Image: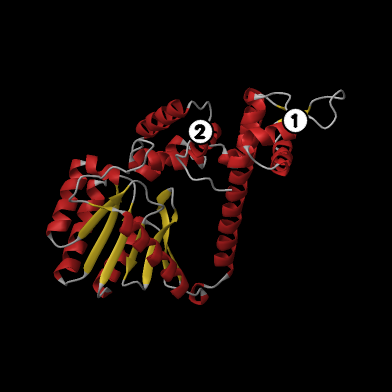
């Protein structure tokens, strides 16, 4: 039960037995547990490293005393929170360093020499390039469409392009976030798209906006938080292989739009949206970031986060992440 805090089953058994039988020596504990005495000593080593046992005192050399759960487990929880925060900081620093390196490299290379990367600026340029690709695509278009309900302008601009593709027999697979099911204009557009032969599925959250054409070219925003900041056209073989694998994996687990959004099926009682929000919460995303990835309003994201923290009895986002792991709601990722 306490694996996420560093206690395996045998070690936890020794700790519980020490709490129930304070003052017992290793031989007595081993007898009660029905295990060899060396197993108790091994457990003591682990418990000592975790600060869950301390020496009984000078009058009882070699004897250990179990620290109360109120003190010991709170200490472990605090330590995990610190490690969790440090892990997040390392990830953030790595992302920043990678982004900076990519940006610097792109700036150093002449446009013609950049292998498999082309930069687009402005909505009109992006739409123009998509229109050109639409005329060239032969077999398949795959797309991630985050942000929840789509704007009337975007859907109106996309409809003629989609219609031409589908009439030419091009397969279209689109993945939206579950939140679009609550947007009547978007539902109407998706129903039209599926009536023309397009395939649509939804998931709780998507990593970024992305369009892949014939598995040879991908268009993605430069900044996942601001799709208006520009886009990149990617055509490198290795990059496209990875992006297509990502799309296929998400598609496999997504819910067909014609069906009601299925429950997640976990024992924790979380919906797909709540589970996705909990993962984002544990990763340290703000309410604004969670709203962006779930395709919901800032207010809705805040309400979901508040409800999850209340259910977990957490006073901070860090603690919510740790408690979610302890409860088995999230996998432990060292």
Q: Is residue 195 visible?
A: yes
Label 2 neighbour load within 10 Å: few <14, some 14-19, many 20+: many
Residue 37 in the figure: left or right of residue 210: right
- Establish if 185 lies above or below 23: below
SS state under label 2: helix
* Residue 55 x/y as whole percent: 80, 29
- Establish if 52 lies above or below 151: above
* Residue 279 x/y as whole percent: 45, 42
Q: Is there CB contact under 8 Å for labels 1 and 2?
A: no
- Establish if 200 lies above or below 41: below
Which sits in the foreground, 208 or 156? Answer: 208
Closer to the observer: label 1 or label 2?
A: 1
Residue 305: assigned label: none
- Where residue 121 sits, quadrant-wise, is bottom left
Tell which circle, 1 or 2, labels the residue nearer the N-terminal end: 1
Q: Tell me which residue sits at (59%, 68%) in the image.
A: 108
Residue at label 1?
A: 25
Q: Tell me which residue sits at (72%, 43%) in the image.
A: 42
Q: Check the image and name the residue furthest to the right.
A: 58
Q: Tell me which residue sits at (70%, 41%) in the image.
A: 46
Which sits in the foreground, 301 or 230? Answer: 301
Label 1 neighbour load within 10 Å: few <14, some 14-19, many 20+: some
- Where residue 123 sits, quadrant-wise, is bottom left
The number of numbered discs placed on residues in the rendered structure image is 2
Residue 205 in the figure: left or right of residue 172: right
Q: Is residue 72 visible?
A: no
Residue at label 2?
A: 320
Q: Tell me which residue sits at (16%, 57%) in the image.
A: 194
SS state under label 1: loop
- Establish if 57 lies above or below 273: above
* Residue 159 x/y as whole percent: 19, 58
Label 1, label 2: how far apart the Cα atoms are: 37 Å
């Amino acid at each position: 039960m306490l694996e996420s805090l560093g206690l395996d089953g045998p070690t936890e058994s020794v700790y519980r037995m020490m709490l129930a039988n304070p003052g017992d020596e290793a031989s007595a504990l081993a007898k009660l547990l029905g295990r060899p005495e060396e197993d108790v000593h091994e457990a003591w080593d682990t418990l000592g490293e975790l600060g869950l046992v301390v020496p009984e005192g000078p009058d009882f050399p070699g004897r250990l005393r179990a620290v109360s759960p109120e003190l010991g487990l709170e200490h472990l929880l605090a330590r995990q929170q610190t490690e969790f925060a440090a892990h997040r900081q390392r990830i953030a620093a790595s992302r920043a360093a990678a982004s900076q390196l990519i940006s610097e490299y792109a700036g150093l290379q002449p446009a013609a020499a950049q292998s498999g990367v082309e930069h687009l600026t402005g909505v009109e340029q992006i739409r123009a390039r998509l229109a050109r690709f639409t005329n060239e695509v032969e077999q398949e278009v795959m797309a991630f469409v985050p942000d929840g309900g789509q704007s009337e302008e975007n859907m109106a601009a996309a409809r003629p392009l989609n219609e031409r593709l589908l009439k030419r027999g091009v397969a279209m697979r689109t993945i939206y976030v579950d939140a679009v099911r609550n947007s009547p204009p978007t539902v109407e557009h998706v129903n039209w798209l599926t009536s023309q032969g397009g395939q649509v599925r939804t998931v709780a959250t998507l990593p970024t906006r992305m369009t892949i054409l014939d598995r040879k070219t991908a268009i993605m925003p430069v900044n996942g938080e601001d799709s208006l900041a520009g886009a990149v056209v990617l055509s490198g073989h290795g990059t496209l292989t990875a992006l297509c694998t990502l799309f296929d994996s998400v598609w496999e687990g997504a819910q067909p739009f014609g069906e009601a959004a299925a429950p997640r099926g976990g024992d924790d009682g979380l919906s797909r949206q709540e589970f996705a929000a909990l993962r984002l919460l544990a990763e340290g995303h703000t309410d604004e970031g969670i709203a962006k990835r779930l395709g919901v309003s800032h207010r809705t994201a805040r309400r979901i986060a508040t409800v999850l923290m209340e259910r977990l009895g957490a006073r901070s986002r860090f603690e919510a992440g740790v408690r979610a792991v302890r409860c088995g709601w999230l996998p432990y990722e060292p």
